[in-house]
């Protein structure tokens, strides 16, 4: 049964980044990764809520969910442990759903993967991209593709898509959303930065256009069974 959810999505957006303060996130990620990820999610919430980048109805809580479980069917890895992943933002309109994974990489750089060869290690120019102190090259996660597959099984009548959206990087001050960074401080190119399942990356404005393209501009009622499933799978 669906929860009674307020229609004003601003309260929902203010919870952006909350899942990265959960115990599961702290166990899986470093302190720096969780802090940075939380800032990026809050920054997306700021840009999504201003500038008419999305239709006004997309901000309402019957069209928007934050921090959903990316493994709702609790599938296990080969080691027997549960995959732990979250979907930063979920937008729905009618039977169309789009998952948004928010990231922030250094400005002006060219990022890509050899996805055509099923090699999802991230390159920054001609060198491997490293974000952790263990000197390991970062790889694009399969979590978004897994989320699309699992929710497609739960909602076979839904048209589900996932994207990776890059927001500007830069220092922020403390606050509900954080101070908006210079919108020019985006990666130079992420066209060829793709993850498993063909999940594509977009710079901020391109990403918002892709959300609008998938959802459509005219508001449509989100069926109750879709709302129920998305309500039930909040990240804990």
Image: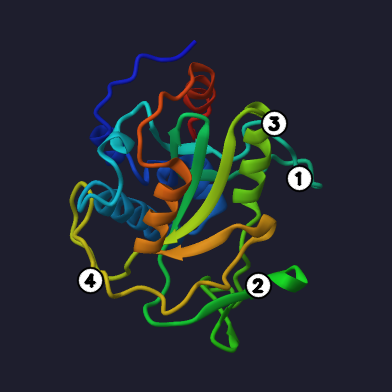
Circle 4/circle 2 CB separation < 8 Å: no
Circle 4/circle 1 CB separation < 8 Å: no
Point out the frontmost of discs 4 and 2.
4
Q: Give neighbour class at mark 4: few <14, some 14-19, many 20+ (Cα, 10 Å).
A: few
Q: Which residue is mark 3?
A: 153
State the separation of the CA atoms marked 1 and 2.
20 Å
Residue extending farthest to the bottom is 126
Q: State which tag comes first along the sequence, 4 or 1.
A: 1
Residue 212 locus on image (x, y percent):
39, 48
- Circle 4: element type: loop
Q: State which tag comes first along the sequence, 1 or 2.
A: 1
Residue 123 locus on image (x, y percent):
59, 79
State the separation of the CA atoms marked 4 and 1.
40 Å
Q: Nearer the viewer, residue 171 or 24?
A: 171
Residue 27 locus on image (x, y percent):
54, 48
Q: Residue at x 24, y 46 (%)?
A: 49
Label annotation for residue 77: 1
Q: Is residue 109 placed above or below 207 in the rendered structure?
A: below
Residue 73 locus on image (x, y percent):
68, 31
Q: State which tag comes first along the sequence, 3 or 2.
A: 2
Label annotation for residue 182: 4
């Amino acid at each position: 049964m669906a929860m009674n959810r307020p229609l004003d999505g601003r309260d929902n957006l203010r919870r952006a980044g909350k899942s990265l303060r959960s115990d599961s996130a702290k166990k899986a990620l470093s302190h720096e990764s969780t802090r940075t990820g939380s800032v990026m999610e809050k920054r997306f919430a700021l840009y999504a809520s201003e500038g008419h980048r999305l239709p006004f109805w997309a901000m309402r809580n019957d069209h928007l969910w934050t921090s959903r479980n990316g493994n709702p069917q609790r599938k296990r890895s080969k080691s027997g442990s549960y995959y732990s992943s979250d979907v930063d933002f979920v937008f729905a309109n009618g039977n169309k759903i789009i998952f948004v994974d928010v990231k922030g990489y250094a400005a002006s750089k060219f990022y890509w993967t050899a996805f055509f060869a099923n090699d999802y290690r991230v390159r920054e120019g001609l060198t491997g991209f490293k974000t952790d102190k263990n000197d390991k090259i970062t790889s694009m996660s399969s979590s978004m593709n897994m989320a699309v597959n699992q929710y497609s099984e739960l909602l076979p009548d839904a048209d589900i898509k996932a994207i990776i959206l890059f927001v500007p990087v830069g220092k922020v001050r403390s606050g509900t959303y954080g101070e908006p960074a210079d919108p020019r401080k985006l990666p130079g190119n992420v066209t060829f930065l793709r993850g498993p399942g063909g999940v594509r990356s977009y710079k901020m404005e391109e990403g918002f256009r892709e959300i609008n393209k998938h959802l459509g501009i005219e508001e449509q009622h989100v069926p109750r069974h879709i709302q129920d499933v998305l309500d039930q799978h909040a990240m804990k």
